[in-house]
Amino acid sequence: MSADIFTEDVRKLIYKCRLVAHDYLFFSTTGFRDTTMTNYIGNYALMYAINRKISDIQRNASGTVPFYKEDIPKMSIYATPAFVASESKVPLAPCNIIQWENQPHAYVTFNSVNTITQLTETVRVNLPQIGRKAKCPPLNSFNFFAIGGNPGGVVRLGKKQVPCRIYAVPLNVDKVSSSIFHPSHPINLEDLTGWASEDIKSAELIMQTPPLLVNARLKAEHYVCSDNVNTYRIAKPDASKYRSVLLPK
């Protein structure tokens, strides 16, 4: 392998990604009966989707207990949490771009009848049988960043295995910094190395799984990247937690 090829590979370790839903998409919700979604997708769900070739972490059924501690060290591509895309153009294929505005959440109502009591309510209040569930319509899209490899292609996202397609563009890694910065993406605090409360200068907390910081200003190690037009600041994940991810130095 020539030095030029090696340099090019290292240079393409961070990608700006666009995830486009190809079916109704729903994930962690807030509320009870009438559930709503946030504008963010947690990065654990994304990482299970983009590390689809690692058979050890893909399970047909895993119950209600997550396997994050066992699975995360095996993942070779890290993903930041995703946020709703604001661009008005959506790719259907690498060379097929359409004009599309993200659509409001669609609500699906459910009104299940208990076949024994012939009623729509039961005493088990944690299992509601009447309500609405919010979903993202097809072609709505989200942005995130990936580190360690190209996550592009067709994926199945979340427990419902919703089909999505990811389009990835490599970024130039200009430098690594430890100064105060505004991240270009939501922050999962569990992924930062040795942070303290005083490192968070300001942020908005989004309560979902995992909890996320948005519109943040914090002090942490991060990458300054560019695509020759825009500059992006991407928090560096904890290398001891993501042991299989090749991180730019």
Image (cartoon, helix red, strand yellow):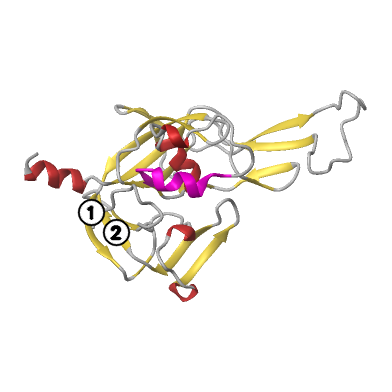
Name the residue rendered at 48%, 70% in the picture. Answer: 202
The foreground one among 6 and 105 is 6
Element type at mark 2: strand
Residue 132 screen position, x and y as percent: 72, 37
Residue 86 screen position, x and y as percent: 44, 45
Name the residue rendered at 85%, 41% in the picture. Answer: 124
Outermost residue to the right: 117
Q: Quadrant of residue 151?
A: top left
Magenta-drawn segment: 66-78
What residue did someone put label 2 on?
223
| C-alpha span from label 2 to label 1 | 7 Å
As drawn, the label of residue 7 is: none
Quadrant housing the N terminus: top left
Q: Amino acid at mark 2?
A: Tyr
Position of 133 with respect to 152 (left or right) is right
Q: Please say whether residue 69 is one of the residues in the magenta stretch.
A: yes
Name the residue rendered at 90%, 25% in the picture. Answer: 116
Q: Is residue 111 above or below residue 39?
A: above
Quadrant housing the C terminus: bottom left
The foreground one among 97 and 19 is 19
The foreground one among 118 and 63 is 63
- Any part of residue 42 in sight: no
Q: Is residue 121 above or below residue 6?
A: above
Residue 224 screen position, x and y as percent: 27, 59
Q: Is residue 142 above or below residue 116?
A: below
What residue did someone put label 1 on?
173
